[in-house]
Image: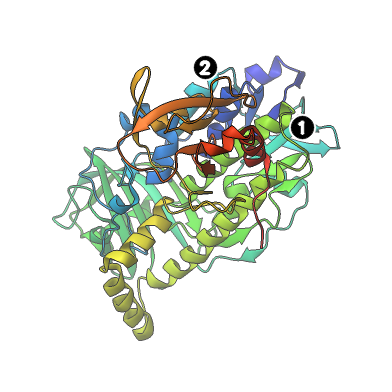
């Protein structure tokens, strides 16, 4: 138990977040932005400085930029020449430029660096993060949740479990986690090399150029600067090892020599862990006053840098909705739209990572090898590449929101605007965490009455955004679009209110 926890016996807050990884800390930042009192409980006494999920995908980068969080992360990013993402480590870079984004390439950055930036921002917003505080009990009723953690009792309106694939909260609530168990395990290690052979890569590039095999192993060695490398490896024969067994120096040395030659010498191991390729997803992301996000809600093979980004995007979707529920600005049932929107997104990721697992097999049989050749040819076609790039980056995601306008439910590009105050990028308008009603034609009347936390911005734009008036949610998706005529009969305020609080279509 930490000294800070020892000094506490009882806390009352509006939201408890269990888990101080990227998902939990992103959610903490979003709640703080909305003025919600939040407490984060993390069982680990200190942050492990392990690379883990090592890349921010383009859509996540856009969301972070809209909150002013991208710039401090870019200062910590691993220096690298821009290179497209990948699908199943196939040798065709994914091109995100057709998706009208300012961030078309994945940004390599260690997970612990992301967590540090997010925790610093959360703290400035008044969020308390208690490390070394393991949750041992969760009891909820219609009014709230009582959480027990290392002798501390916390009362809150809601609890959000962001505590990973082995979620304690999920276990305490005895919730099934259906899916498919893993077929093999691998090792992820942050290491230092005291000597290297010519086979060791000198710089980061496309992942397909980093994959190697030898001596019964497959491996990927990514240079991080100086003598530091991130090593991922496994046995090509898929020999299983107990996931809880510690990773030994001898095990890492054997893999390095088999794949990169006897000249490659292990100097030190900073961190090492095992991971698997299980695929599982909760049936419901909400159980009364308890919600689930990130790996606590879904796990899948770690292909294409999807897990970290999927969890952070869960948090961006949930944050403004949970704040509205806590502050009683949303109708009954509105919070269920989090599950309705995000569950299908994760199901799609589970689906395509399952396909990637087959294509990325280090020892494909003749049929899989033939399939790989066909998929590689398809990825070289611009339309196919664009489709997969949108899928892997998150840029093509749209939500099934009510409305007939083609922009409804789609992400809005970060366009250059001109307002009365001067030039501004659209992403900057979302920095407050408010929704934005964007009037691009000057057709909305003065004195228009809007719901709380909806900002009216009058602007011009050199490019055609597809509508004269757009209502953009706090997470950057269009939930209503039309022209100024709606205001002339007084229907725009109703449209705005309904668009922000209407459940997405299902079925």
Which residue is denoted by mark 1 in the rendering?
147
User: What is the number of the mark on residue 357?
Assistant: none
Q: Is residue 24 left or right of residue 184?
A: right
> Which residue is painted at 23% across and 48% down in the image?
204
Q: Is residue 205 left or right of residue 319?
A: left
- Mark 1 Cα within 10 Å, few/some/many (few <14, many 20+)? many
SS at circle 1: strand
Quarter holding the C terminus is bottom right
Of residues 150 and 105, the one drawn nearer to the viewer in this rendering: 105
Quarter holding the N terminus is top right
Q: Position of residue 243 (x, y in %)?
A: 54, 56
Q: Is residue 145 left or right of residue 16?
A: right
Q: Which residue reaches farthest top?
A: 7
Of residues 265 and 446, the one drawn nearer to the viewer in this rendering: 446
Which residue is denoted by mark 2 in the rendering?
124
SS at circle 2: helix
- Which comes sooner in the sequence, label 1 or label 2? 2
> Which residue is painted at 42% across and 55% down in the image?
187
Is 427 rendered above or below residue 59?
above
Q: Position of residue 141 (x, y in %)?
A: 86, 37
Q: How many marks?
A: 2
Q: Position of residue 32 (x, y in %)?
A: 59, 23
């Amino acid at each position: 138990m930490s000294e800070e926890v020892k000094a506490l016996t009882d806390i009352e807050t509006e939201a408890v977040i269990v888990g101080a990884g990227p998902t939990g800390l992103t959610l903490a930042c979003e709640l703080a932005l909305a003025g919600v009192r939040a407490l984060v409980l993390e069982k680990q006494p200190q942050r492990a400085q392990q690379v883990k999920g090592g890349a921010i995908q383009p859509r996540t980068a856009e969301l972070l930029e809209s909150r002013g969080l991208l710039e401090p992360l870019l200062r910590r990013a691993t220096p690298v020449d821009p290179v497209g993402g990948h699908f199943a480590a196939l040798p065709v870079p994914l091109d995100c430029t057709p998706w009208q984004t300012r961030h078309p390439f994945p940004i390599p950055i260690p997970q612990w660096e992301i967590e540090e930036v997010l925790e610093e921002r959360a703290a400035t917003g008044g969020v308390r993060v208690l490390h070394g505080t393991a949750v041992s009990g969760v009891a909820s009723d219609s009014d709230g949740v009582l959480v027990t953690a290392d002798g501390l009792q916390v009362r809150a309106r809601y609890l959000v479990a962001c505590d990973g694939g082995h979620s304690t909260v999920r276990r305490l609530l005895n919730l099934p986690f259906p899916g498919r168990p893993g077929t093999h395990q691998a090792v992820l290690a942050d290491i230092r090399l005291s000597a290297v052979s010519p086979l060791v890569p000198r710089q980061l590039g496309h992942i397909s150029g980093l994959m190697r095999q030898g001596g019964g192993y497959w491996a990927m060695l990514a240079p991080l600067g100086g003598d530091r490398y991130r090593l991922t490896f496994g046995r090509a024969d898929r020999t299983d090892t107990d996931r809880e067994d510690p990773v030994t120096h001898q095990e890492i040395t054997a893999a390095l020599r088999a794949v990169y030659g006897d000249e490659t010498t292990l100097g030190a191991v900073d961190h090492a862990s095992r991971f698997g390729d299980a695929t599982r997803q909760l049936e419901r992301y909400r159980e009364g006053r308890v919600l689930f996000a990130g790996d606590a809600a879904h796990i899948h093979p770690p292909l294409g840098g999807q897990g970290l980004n999927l969890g952070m995007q869960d948090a961006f979707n949930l944050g403004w909705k949970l704040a509205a529920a806590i502050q009683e600005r949303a109708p009954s049932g509105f919070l269920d739209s989090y599950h309705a929107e995000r569950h299908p997104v994760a199901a799609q990721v589970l689906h395509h990572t399952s396909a990637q697992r087959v294509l990325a097999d280090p020892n494909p049989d003749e049929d899989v090898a033939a399939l790989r050749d066909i998929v590689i040819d398809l990825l070289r076609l611009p339309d196919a590449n664009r489709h997969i790039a949108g899928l892997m980056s998150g840029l093509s995601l749209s939500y099934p929101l009510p409305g007939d306008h083609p922009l409804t439910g789609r992400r809005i590009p970060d366009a250059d605007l001109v307002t009365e105050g001067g030039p501004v990028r659209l992403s900057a308008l979302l920095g407050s965490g408010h929704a934005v009603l964007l009037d691009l034609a000057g057709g909305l009347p003065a004195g228009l009455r809007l719901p709380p936390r909806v900002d009216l911005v009058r602007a011009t734009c050199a490019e055609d955004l597809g509508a004269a008036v757009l209502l953009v949610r706090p997470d950057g998706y269009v939930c209503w679009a039309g022209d100024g005529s709606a205001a002339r009969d007084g229907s725009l305020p109703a449209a705005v209110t309904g668009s922000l609080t209407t459940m997405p279509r299902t079925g």
